[in-house]
Amino acid sequence: MKTAVKTRLVEVVVPVHNEQRALRASIGRLHGYLAGSFPYGFRITIADNASSDDTWQIAQELATCYPEVRAVHLEEKGRGRALRQVWAASEADVVSYMDVDLSTDLDAFLPLVAPLLSGHSDLAIGTRLARTANVVRGPKREFLSRTYNLLLRGVMGAGFSDAQCGFKAARTEIAQALLPAVEDQEWFFDTELLLLAERHGLRIHEVPVDWVDDPDSRVDLVRTAADDLKGMARVARKALSGAANLPVPARVQQARLPKGMARQLPSFVVIGIVSTLSYLLLYSLLRLVAPAYAANAVALFVTAVANTAANRRFTFGVKGSAGAIRHQVEGLIAFLVGLALTTGGLALLPSGAPHWVELVAVIVANGLATLVRFLLLRVWVFNPDRRSAR
């Protein structure tokens, strides 16, 4: 029987840093899967970024053992730095990467790259947030992932669902065209790449994946989350200033705020700033006599009641006492969202974290809750159509 000739080439990059424990077994499993069932030519590149254990030696041994495997060494640490170096020099039709723990089921790899090889899409990502995805992971990672991706969609206007899944691919010419504009060298690298691609009007294909969390992961979740927030702020500032030199679609240029929002937003922002400062002051005072969770709940409840009353009068122009109690009861839904987010943020902190770290955590969570609050107040609680119908 004549074997089909594999004429297309897909490069799979596995970035590693001090992964001597998992590297040999993972590359063996990945190579076996691709050699046995992948219908295209492939190359596996182990990108060792500044490992201080035996990772580089094992990578070299694997490159000798398997003809489709090669090893690249970088003197500086950084997943984004490793992907940038390999992808920029690649001659493959499609470049991709996956985490060394192979948490994502490899059966999703062909659906990931097939639309790129056919020319249907420009980039592809695995998503753990689709309804059909099957994901096993702890509550801390689940909370962080969903919060981060919600921020990307709410603040950055991202259309893709899961920026952090370590299972992505791109047509090589597309990746190489975008790389010079990507600044991050570490964990925010792929998020920044996706944001740039979306702003350029490129098509991003999503594949629901089966994903099992690696219990031995050594990623510093708090530091990574902080770095991601800094990256989002930098990309937003760059886009708003025009420094990113990105084309703005006509539909975005012609977009206008919904009716009434231009008047409501400034008032909501001012009230939000006063509420946040009051919350932080009250939280700090209560922390002198109460645990963090209790101080957070009381401070948030008091400021939420005052916030709803102020927005009722000044932002949405509702006067008189009619419906005031109902508005407060409905406004408590926003309070519960804020409580869940700030409590979750506090729960992620290591035991004995200093007070300033607590404040940073609740500020970030409170910022996300503020977005939810404005939407709830505008669309539901103080919706003029709803008020006129009563």
Image: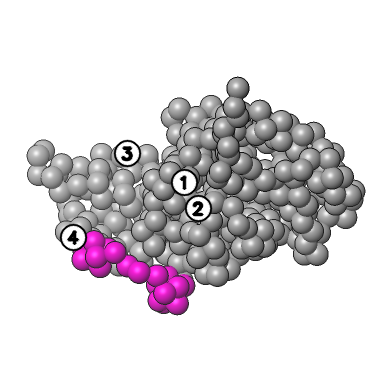
Q: Residue 188: say if magenta.
A: no
Q: CA distance from mark 3 to mark 4?
A: 24 Å
**Cβ–Cβ under 8 Å for marks 1 and 4:** no
Q: Of discs 1 and 3, which sits in the foreground?
A: 1
Q: Amino acid at mark 2?
A: Arg
Label 1 vs 3, first from the N-terminus: 1
Neighbour class for label 2 at 10 Å: few (<14), some, many (≥20)? many
Query: What residue is at 64 percent from the left and 62 percent from the top?
Result: 89
Q: Secondary structure at mark 3?
A: helix
Q: Which mark is residue 116?
A: 1
Q: Amino acid at mark 3?
A: Val
Q: Of discs 3 and 4, which sits in the foreground?
A: 4
In percent of width and height, residue 140 lies at 62, 39
Residue 233 appears in view: no
In percent of width and height, residue 162 lies at 50, 44
**Cβ–Cβ under 8 Å for marks 2 and 1:** yes
Q: CA distance from mark 4 to mark 2?
A: 43 Å
Q: Does residue 62 appear left or right of residue 106 in this picture?
A: right
Please give the range of residues in magenta.
238-256
Per the image, the residue denoted by label 3 is 329
Q: CA distance from mark 3 to mark 2?
A: 52 Å
Q: Which mark is residue 171?
A: 2
Q: CA distance from mark 1 to mark 3?
A: 50 Å
Within the image, what quadrant is residue 266 found in? bottom left
Q: Does residue 354 appear left or right of residue 334 in this picture?
A: right
Q: Amino acid at mark 4?
A: Gly
**Cβ–Cβ under 8 Å for marks 3 and 4:** no
Per the image, the residue denoted by label 4 is 260
